[in-house]
Amino acid sequence: MKISSKITSILLIAALAAGSSVFAASAIDEENSTESNSNNEVVAYAESVEVSVDTSPEIMVEQVATNPVATGTVQISRNKLTLGVGEGFKLNATVKNTNDPSQALSWSSSNKAVLTVTGNGNVKTVKEGIAVVTVKLKNGSSASCTVTVKKAPTSISLNKKSITLGVGEVFDLNSSLPSGCGAYSIKYYSNNSSVAPVKAAGGLVTAKRAGTAVITAKTYNGKTVSCNVTVKNAPNKISLNKTSLTLGVGEKYDLNSSLPKGTAAYKVLYSTNNAGVADVKAAGGLVTAKRAGTVVVTATTYNGKKVSCKITVKNAPNKISLNKTSLSLNKQGTFDLNSSLPSGTASHSVVYSSSNPKVAEVKSAGGFVTAKSAGTAVITAKTYNGKTAKCTVKVSNASYTQDDLYCLAAVIWQEAGASYCSDRLQLLVANVVMNHVESPYFPNTIRGVITRKGAYGKMYWDGVSIPKANDPITKAAIDRCYANAKKILEGYRILPSSVIYQAGFVQGSGVYTYEEGMYFCYK
C-alpha cells in the first residue's frame, strides 16, 4: 500500500549549536490521515509534533561540560608581610560565594630564590628580597601577598629594660630589631606568671600580685632580650608637687605625681578642664599656659585615683626687678636677692646665675647669694620669657672689727641673752641688725645702727655694754652671745634682707615670723 506524507526534518545537533528552539512538524494530508495496509490494518499519524530544547546555561553545562568549573572568589589572610631569612609563615586562603568550598587551590611564588611556598600556603624564606605569593582557583580568581624578606635579626630590644607596675595594671612590651633585619615571629615568656603573665604574641603584660618577674622576648632564630618587672600594690591615692600654681602666658611647668610608699602606677594620665587656658600632656604632666584665666589639671592613676592642681595664668611679664642692684659682701657673707614683677603678670620660673661663681655663687632657684672670694660678680635673674635684671656684687676679704663683734654680742645680750632663749632667737636678733647695716636707709655700721634714737632703748642713752661675767652661768651666757654674733658676722643669714623690725609687737608691712614672744617684720 502507498502512503502519502509530508515530513520536515529536524537537525537537533545544528539547533543546539545555534542555541535556538527547534520546532519539527510532520504534516500529513488531512484526507490521507488514515489508510489501510494490505492487511487491512489502520495506520494513524500525529497531526503535528513540536520538539523544544532548553538552552539555558545550567542545562547547557549539563549537556556539554563533562568537567564543570566551580564558582567562587579566593581571598588571602595577608596582603603584606615582612619576614627574616630562614623564617616560616602560614598563609591562609578562603573561598567566598562558591558552590564548592572544598575546591583545590594552587599556590605559587614569584621568586623561588627568595622564598618558597607549599600547596597549603606554608612560606619558607631563603634569602633577602621581595617575592609575591599568589593563590588561585581554576576559574581564574586569585589573591596575592607581597613578602619582604630581610636579614635574620642579630639582636632584639624592648621598649623597657625594667618597669614597675601596680597590681591590676597592664603594659605593652614592644620589641624592635636592628636596621635591615626582620622577624614576624617574636614570642614572649614570663618566668613568674603568678606575678606578671604575658601574652605570647604581642607582649601585653598584666600585673597580678606584688613581686618580681622577668619577661623574655625571643625571635624565631633564638635572639632574646629581657625586662625586669616589679609589681607593687595598687595606689590608694595620688599626690602632686603643686596643689596650686601661677604661671605666665607661654610658660611651662612639669606637674610631678607621687604615690604612697609600697604602691605603684606606671600609667598616670593628666587632663585639663580648659585647654584654652592651660594645656597638659596626657603622659608626663607638662603644663603649658595659653591665656589668662584659671584651670584645673587632674592626674588619674590606672585604677581611678585622682588629684588636682588649680592653675592661675597671668600675662607674661615685660620686666623684672631685684631688691638690690648692687651689693657689698665680706667673704662668706650671704644675701637673698628677691625678684618682683609688674602687677597682673607672672613668671613661676625665675632663674638666677652668676657671671663669676668663684667670687659670688647664687642658687639658680631663689637667688640666695654666697660670697666666695674677693672680686666682683654680676648676678642675673631671668624670667621664662627672657626678661632680666642684674645686681653687681662686690666681695671683700675684709674681716669684721672687734667693735663690730662687741656691739652685735651686746645687742644679742640685751634682746635675747636669757638662758631660756634659743640660739635661733639670738641669730634672728643679730640678723635684723645686719639687715639694717646693709640697707641704704640706715647707718652702715653696727654701732651706728644700735645706738640711733628709738632703736634699741638704753643703748642710745647709756651706750653699748655687756656686764662682767662674775659667775660660770653668766660667763656661759655671754660666750653664747659672742658665738652667735660671730656666726652672723661671718656671713650666716637666717632672715630675708627685707626683714628689719624686731619687737614684741607687729610693725612694718607684715610678719615674717613670730618666735619666742618676738615678731620679726618686713619693712
Image (spheres, grey):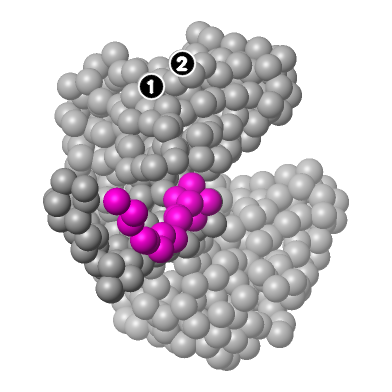
Viewer-proximal residue, 450 or 364?
364
Q: Are marks 1 and 2 in contact (CB under 8 Å)?
A: yes
Give the vertical position of 79 relative to 225 (above or below). below
Name the foreground residue: 167 vs 411: 167
Q: Confirm whether the magenta stretch covers residue 397.
A: no
Q: Is residue 521 left or right of residue 492?
A: left
What residue is disc 1 on?
188
Q: Which disc is residue 218 wearing?
A: 2
Marked residue nearer the N-terminal end (1 or 2): 1
Mark 1 crowdedness (10 Å alpha carbons): few <14, some 14-19, many ≥20? many
Residue 358 lies in quadrant: top right
* Image spot of residue 17 (x, y percent): 53, 51
Up the image or down, 18 lies above or below 325; here it is above
Q: Which residues are magenta?
A: 1-16
In the drawing, what numbered circle is on residue 54?
A: none
Q: Position of residue 18 (x, y in %)?
A: 54, 57
Figure quadrant of residue 355: bottom right
- Which amino acid type corresponds to the residue marked 2 in the rendered image? Lys
Q: Nearer the viewer, residue 103 or 394?
A: 103
